[in-house]
Amino acid sequence: MSRGVRWAAGFILMTHGLVHLLVWPGAPLGAPGSDARLRWNGTSWSWEPSWLPPMAIRTVGGVLLAAAILGFLAAGLALLGLPGARRFPLLTSGTGAVCSLLMFGLSWPGLEPDPSEFATGPCLSTAVLGSVALALLLRKWPGLLRGWPRRPVAGNLPGAPPPTNRTA
């Protein structure tokens, strides 16, 4: 991958990670002084049994949010070439994407003012997770895009005599 593409992907991942801050604590909407905000109100349709306190739901949401932000920031810095971080770009971007998807799954119905305004986040996280899976698949089977399995050349067949360099 060229340096320019790596840098662009790194900045996109870092921006995607920081945009998660719109979920919590949120961002003001509309006119200054208005109380309307893009945010998560702390409720969840999937994590609200009667015995689970709301503070536990907020804590799990906060941990998932922090892991998603840190994962995407570390992945972006890895693609930018930060020593130490550049050893784990797939691990950090995969962790960020999984935590982001779990966080959106937890907080989706509680997103205000309308959950559809946050629809880009899970789509980008799914794309990142898919690209991580594709990179891992291509690392495992490098010939996958070149017409794998490769057919043996005539001189490389089992039992064939070794090639000679005689021209006369």
Image: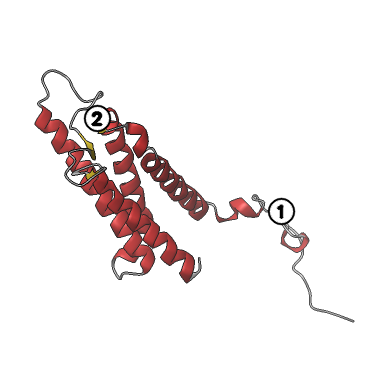
Residue 136 or 58: which is nearer the viewer? Answer: 58
Vertical comparison of 46 with 157: above or below: above
Q: Residue furthest bottom?
A: 168
Residue 144 or 61: which is nearer the viewer? Answer: 61
- Tell me which residue sits at (16%, 44%) in the image: 33
Residue located beneath label 1 in the image: 151
- Quarter location, residue 26: top left
Q: Residue furthest right?
A: 168
Residue 168 % position (x, y): 90, 82
Looking at the image, can residue 70 be seen? yes
Q: Which mark is residue 5?
A: none
Q: Regarding mark 2 in the picture, which secondary structure is present there?
A: helix
- Quarter location, residue 44: top left
Mark 1: few/some/many CA within 10 Å (<14, 14-19, 20+): few
Residue 154 appears left or right of 67: right
Amino acid type shown at disc 2: Gly
Q: Nearer the viewer, mark 2 or mark 1?
A: 2
Residue 155 appears left or right of 42: right
Label 2 and label 1: CA atoms lie apart by: 55 Å
Q: Regarding mark 1 in the picture, which secondary structure is present there?
A: loop
- Tell me which residue sits at (12%, 28%) in the image: 54
Looking at the image, can residue 87 be seen? no
Q: Which mark is residue 110?
A: 2
Colouring mode (rainbow / by chain / secondary structure / one colour) = secondary structure
Earlier sequence position, callout 2 versus callout 1: 2
Vertical comparison of 12 with 51: above or below: below
Amino acid type shown at disc 1: Arg
- Quarter location, residue 31: top left
- Tell me which residue sits at (25%, 24%) in the image: 46
For the image, the number of numbered tags is 2
Residue 34 % position (x, y): 19, 41
Residue 159 or 50: which is nearer the viewer? Answer: 50
